[in-house]
Image (cartoon, rainbow, N blue to C red):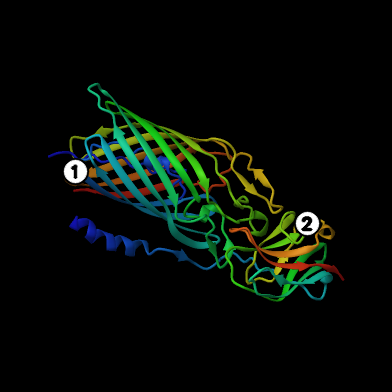
Amino acid sequence: MKKILGLLPLLLVFWSCEVEGDLTRTQAKSLDQGTAILKYSGNFSGTSGIAVIGQAKIYLEGNRYRVQLENFSISEGPDLKVYLSKGATPTEFVSLGNLTAATVYEIPKEVIVANYSHVLIHCQQYNHLYAIAPLNAN
Amino acid sequence: MTLLLLPLTFVYSQGCSDAGICSLAGSFLTDAPSKNTVEFGNIFGAGEAAVKYYSPYLAYTRKFSNQFALSAKITYSLASGSFGKRGQFGDAYLTANYDWKSKRTLKWSTLLGMKFPFTQSNLKINGYSLPLDYQASLGTFDWIVGVTLKYENWDFNSALQLPVFNLNRNSYFKEYSGTNDFPTTNLFERRPDVLFRTTYTYKTKGKFTFKPNVLFLYHLGQDSAENYYGVREAIPGSEGLTINGNLIGSYAMNSTNSIDISLATPFVVRTIRPDGLTRSFTAAIIYKMSF
C-alpha cells in the first residue's frame, strides 16, 4: 500500500489535469463596411434574469449574408449559440455557431434570410433562451 | 518463481478516449498473483488530420477470490493538431470479472462494466467548438458486457458496449470550422459496438510473453448529429467493421512487477468515423504492479 501512496502524487503531477492551448486555426471573420449593405436589424432584450445590451444587424456582402452583433454584451452562460430564428423561441432556426469574442457570423448560402424574423442567443447545453432580437427590414 | 500473470490490457488502434470494450474486454482473468494490482499505461497515437494523442490511464484491480475481481480505471487524453492542444480526464470505468469454475481445459469468464464520462464531449479552445477527435470522452454512460473463452494458449473475447445515457453536448459544425477534415458532430449520438478478439499467448522460457491478437469491432448502426437547422441526421458510413492487429510483448521483472509494450494498427476501417476513433497507429507502455 505504501508503494501505491508513493506512486499516486507522481502520477497526478504527470497528468497535470486540464490542458487548453491556443486556437491555431483562424476562424474570426470581419465585415467590409464599404461594400456591406444593411438589410435587417433589431435590439436585444434578455429573458428572465439575463442582462443584455446591443443590436443584431444582418448585412449582405457580395452574395453572402452575415450577422453582426454591435455594442453587444450579455450575462455569462455556458455554451451560448447565435441562432437565426423564425420566431421568438428556438423551434425553427439556423444555428450560426458559438457566441464568441467574434462579432460576425456567416449565414449559410442556402438559407433564405427573409424567412427568419429573429436573432436569438441560446444556451444549447441546457436548452435555455438568453436573449431575443426581433428583426426589422432596413 | 511464480510468473506474473496479470489481466491483459489491449490497446486498440481504433483508439479514442478509449470507447471502452477494447481495453476492458481483455481484463477478464483473475489469475494475478496478489490481491491488488495497479496498472499505469501511457498510450501514444496518431489519428486522422495529423492529430496526435497522448492518453495515460490508471487502473486498480482488487481480487476478492480466485474467481471474482473488481476493477476501476480512469483515463486521460491530450490531443494536439491543427486546432491546437486540448487535454482533460476522459472516463471512469468500473468492471466486475467472474471466472467460472472448470476442471476442463475450456475456461469461461464474464465481465460486467460501466463507463462514466468526465466531460460532455464539448471541450473548446478559446470558445471554439472542437470535433470529437479532440474530446477526451464521447460523453456517454455505457454498459459493457463480455465473455471470454480460454483454451490452452488461445483466448476468445466477445463483448458489447451499449450507450445508455447520452450526455454528449458536442457543438462542432464542419460548416463553420474552415476545414472538411472532420464531420459535423453537433449533439452527437453514438450507436453500440460489438467486439470479437482472438489472442494467442506465447511464453518464452525466460521472462517474456508475447500476445499477438486480432480484434474485430462492429459499430451497430449509423451515428447521428444535429445539423445547423436543428434537425437530426444519420451519418452515412459511420456503421460497420473495423479490424485491428495488436502485438503485446510483456516482460516480467519479478513475480509482482511487469512492463508491457503494445503496438496496434487497423487493417480495415469504417468509411467515416465521426466519433474520433481514428487512430492509424498506437504504441503503449504499461507498468503493472501487484501487492
Circle 2 packing at 10 Å, graded few (<14), some (14-19), many (20+), is few
Position of B85 with respect to A5 (left or right) is: right
Q: Residue furthest bottom?
A: A71
- Residues B25 and B198: in front is B25
Task: State the mark number for residue B195.
Answer: none
| The C terminus of chain A, quarter of image | bottom right
Q: Which element type, helix, strand or loop, lies under badge 2?
A: loop
Q: Which element type, helix, strand or loop, lies under badge 1?
A: loop
Can residue B225 be seen by looking at this rendering? yes
Task: State the mark number for residue B34.
Answer: 1
Circle 1 packing at 10 Å, graded few (<14), some (14-19), many (20+), is some
Q: Name the amino acid, label 1.
A: Ser
Report how far apart the C-alphas of labels 2 and 1 lie in the structure: 64 Å
Whether the residues at callouts 2 and 1 have beta carbons within 8 Å, the answer is: no
Can residue A30 be seen by looking at this rendering? no
How many circles with numbers are drawn on the protein?
2
Q: In front: mark 2 or mark 1?
A: 1
Residue at (34, 35) in percent of width and height: B212
Residue at (51, 38) in percent of width and height: B192
Image coords of residue B47 (percent x, y): 50, 50
B127 shown above or below B195: below
The chain letter under disc 1 is B
Position of B78 with respect to B231 (left or right) is: left
Position of A35 with respect to B83 (left or right) is: right
Q: Name the amino acid, label 2.
A: Lys
Image coords of residue B66 (percent x, y): 22, 35
Q: Mark 2 sits on what residue? A: A109
- Residue A26 location, quadrant: bottom right
Image coords of residue A1 (percent x, y): 19, 55
